[in-house]
Image (cartoon, rainbow, N blue to C red):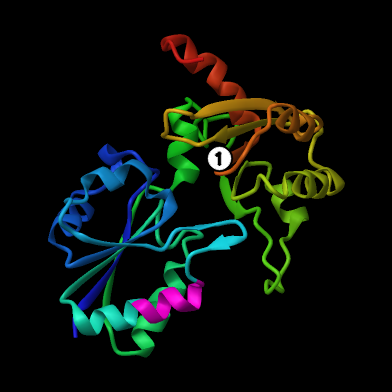
Amino acid sequence: MGKVYLVGSGPGDPELISLKAYRLIKEADVILVDNLVLGVKTLIPVDKEVIDIGKIAGKHKLSQDGINELLVELSAKYDTVVRLKGGDPYIFGRGGEEAAVLKAHGVEFEVVSGITSAVAVPASFYIPLTFRGISSSVTIITGHEMEEKDESLNWDALVNLKGTLVILMGVGNLAKNVESLLGHGMRADTPVAVIEKGFTVDARLVTGTLQNIVDVAKDENVKPPAVIVIGDVVGVREQLKLLTNRV
């Protein structure tokens, strides 16, 4: 039986993957790729066997259970199986679920961490998630509510932390999440940045406040994937962008 590597490809920029991830991409017998792998696909040798299992909202080529089963099946056929995932496998990447299934079936596996888009995408637009005197904490949540998800977020705790809040997969439920934050006492003038399609040629930034960001995002026709940053650190960008030509 072979070994399965759950590999984080980072935010999509081929130059931001780890040396280990790069080596495994070259050595793999078969690679399973997600949609958010983006430009990292260019690093895959043309003669490599690649299985596209990308998922977007409402359109899954293969269910998560199907992906889990496929990983187990491939491990019996190949020595080196790479599951190439966007960002980091353990940050809303369902890597933990896949690892649990592999362990249950006695399959050897290893997790190779990647840079999460929650950090890298804001940084690419000069938004630091922490900044002395402004924010000393970061909370990353998913804005994608799943029907089978029983637990609910502690919105009071999120607001009372007074740090930076990053929402992944949150475009579809932006209005709902904003309503929850405002309803639990977050300032209406809290700066918000929505960064669409980070690390692609179509990457763009839309900004506003908690009070108006829903309307702004609608007017700008913001589409997923996007990273949403909520907090006063968004304003720091005004200082940093003066050093660059980026809008």
130 in relation to 171, above or below: above
Which quadrant is the N terminus positioned in?
bottom left
SS at circle 1: loop
Give me the residue at 43% from left, 10% from top: 245
Task: Say which of 59 and 236 sits in front.
Answer: 59
In the visual, does 17 lie left or right of 89? left
65 in relation to 172, above or below: below
In the visual, does 19 lie left or right of 232? left
x and y, in percent, of residue 237 in the image? 54, 21
The image quadrant of residue 69 is bottom left
The image quadrant of residue 50 is bottom left
Q: Which residue is mark 1?
A: 136
Give me the residue at 18% from left, 59% from top: 48
Give me the residue at 78% from left, 46% from top: 181
- Amino acid residing under circle 1: Ser
x and y, in percent, of residue 85 in the image? 38, 58
Image: magenta residue range: 63-70
x and y, in percent, of residue 6 in the image? 32, 66
Residue at the right extreme, as displayed: 183
In the visual, does 111 lie left or right of 28? right
Give me the residue at 45% from left, 32% from top: 123
Residue 75 on the magenta segment: no
